[in-house]
Image (cartoon, rainbow, N blue to C red):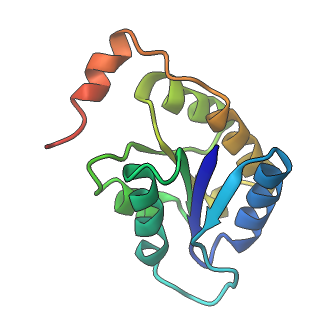
Amino acid sequence: MKISIGNDHAGPEYKMAIVEMLKAKGYEVTNYGTDTTDSVDYPDFGHPVALDVENGKADFGIVICGSGNGINMTVNKHQGIRSALCWTKEIAALARQHNNANIISIPARFTAIHQAVEMVETFLNTDFEGGRHQNRVNKIACS
């Protein structure tokens, strides 16, 4: 499975821990995130992740910023993206089960690194339920 990841200055440590876990499990990872805490603009790191998922270069995306909101708003501007801001593994599971989310957004300043890793594992290992949820998902895009 191919995963695309991007983060701003709030998330380098989170990204490193997540990438380590992903690689240990055999995932192929494309890293668009910054590796420093020097201030950067989250859209510069979110758009490439969204494009990878939208264009089929990645199966799923992971984005990280301080609140998770800014980068989540950025990737959700892409029509083929359904990004979910998650702060617990239960929300990550529901984002996949009910919304068929294809990107998870993580708020680095409001979750611990071990929680972020756990959320990503849950997100990637949870299937979309389809059924009654498919019609709702079909209504999300504005195109």
Q: Position of residue 100 (x, y in %)?
A: 44, 30
User: Which quadrant of the structure image shows residue 127?
Assistant: top right
Q: Position of residue 103 (x, y in %)?
A: 49, 47
- Above or below — where is 61 with respect to 138? below
Q: Is residue 81 left or right of residue 71?
A: left
Q: Residue at x 60, y 73 (%)?
A: 33
Q: Position of residue 13 (x, y in %)?
A: 76, 69
The N terminus sits in image quarter: top right
Q: Nearer the viewer, residue 143 or 66?
A: 143
Q: Residue at x 82, y 44 (%)?
A: 25
Q: Position of residue 97 (x, y in %)?
A: 51, 23
Q: Is residue 26 left or right of residue 95?
A: right
Q: Nearer the viewer, residue 78 or 105?
A: 78
Q: Is residue 25 left or right of residue 3?
A: right
Q: Is residue 136 left or right of residue 110?
A: left
Q: Nearer the viewer, residue 103 or 94?
A: 103
Q: Residue at x 54, y 46 (%)?
A: 60
User: Which quadrant of the structure image shows residue 39?
Assistant: bottom right
